[in-house]
Image: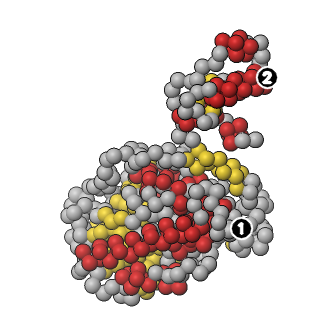
Amino acid sequence: MNCWEGHGARDLEPPGESMTYSNATLEAAKRFSGKAKSDLLRKACETGCLHTDGCDGYILVDDKCFRKADFNLPRCVHDFNLEIWMWTFTSPPLPPYPPHPPPSPPISEQNTVKFFAIGDWNFDHSGESEPNYLPGWVHNRVVCTSTCQGYIADKMREEAAKWPEMYKFVINAGDNFYPFGVDTEFSWEWDGRWGQVYDGLPQMVWYSTQGNHDISQVNRECACGRSKEGCSQIRKHYSGQPTHRGQTWYMPDFNYWVKPLGDAVPLEIISLDTNHHDSGRICPWNVCDRHSCGGWENPYGCTVGDCMGILEDRNFEAERMLRERLDANIGGNVIVFTHYPQEYLLWGGVLGEHGSPGILDQLKRTDVTITFFSAHVHVTEGPKELGPNVEWVVGGGGGWSCDGEQGVVTGDVEVATGKVRNVRMIPAPWHVCCRDNPHPGG
């Protein structure tokens, strides 16, 4: 079975005029139905393609014949571990307009506004059935439950209801769509797995970064291409449809900075892409659909070395931009966030990826007050010492493992000074979020 047969070309939007069949083919088709008719039209479509300039492949949509080149087609990729087909699209260029500015939330006469911080918040449990709803190669002893993300979203709604009009933004530290990211900026998952879950919250901007699970096989261009145009979660920012149920997605680039409350409030947010720290896992899966590849393998157009070099360059740019923005905020207040906690920046990744001492040194500066948020390790905890500054590790009830307490973090911002205060965790009960894995160790 090929990709189009397996998933239905009928779901694709025809681009325009179809190639025409001969009169003899149309007459013959009237005498057949079902598979016989389909086979006849498929053969005629193939023949027509061979005789049509610029046609190097064809697709049947509702018995009409189209050139494959006329579609923005998914590449059909098979994951032999999960026994599923996945789709990855060749992305057209981003629209030629600048990033939309973040909405300026009304502050009126408030002295303080509030925000949430969350990460590793999404895992699709729709196929759950005991005892083995997780892939067999997930060996964690304790895993997240299907109720955890919803419970945390409910706690966010309860908290926001206590403070009307005060919650303005969310720090979103990555691993946003488990387990393989999201294939396009228009996927149903934006509303189904984000908008619907957090429906009922006040209107907020989600300042977001990517985690290791966001750079995956349904979006290989994000790992194997240097342009942000290949990353569906960045493309969402430019899509013209960044808002679902009052929540607005904000991710204009791999690394970026923004003033979340406008120029009048002296607070800056700095977002860093440091996925280099898990490149030993990200890159083989994107390159050859396995946990390791030969150095020569490049079935999708890049090798593991290419991928690692791309992620390394983004990490280098993260350090350069962080230093530049902290220099611009001496004496001030900033929120910095990335997917990986300070231990990864110090020691490197679990597969020998080098650390980022330059980033860590910047986060320990004494001339800027820094509140640092990270994720990745499936636990919510803090504050953790970071030189004179502090780190909060955030979870959100997603992911495959439950490696500690789950919850969401909330904090205040003084409007006059931009100072971040009263950061605290809203916990979720262990029995709501965590349970024993029915098949630990495989």
Dot label at residue 167: none
Q: Which residue is mark 1?
A: 138
Give the camera-side residue of 400 and 411: 400
Residue labelled with disc 2: 36
> What amino acid does circle 1 point to?
Val
Residue 351 visible in image:
yes
Question: Is 158 above or below relative to 356?
Answer: above
Q: Residue at 74% across / 22% down in the picture?
A: 40
Residue displayed at 74% across by 13% down: 28
Report whether 339 appears left or right of 412: right
Please indicate whether residue 242 sits to the left or right of residue 293 in the image.
left
> What type is the residue that disc 2 sits on?
Ala
How far is disc 2 from disc 1 in space, using C-alphas?
44 Å
The percent coordinates of residue 131 (x first, y second) are 79, 61
Quadrant in which residue 272 is drawn: bottom left
> Does residue 206 appear left or right of residue 28 in this picture?
left
Q: Name which quarter of the figure residue 55 lies in.
A: top right
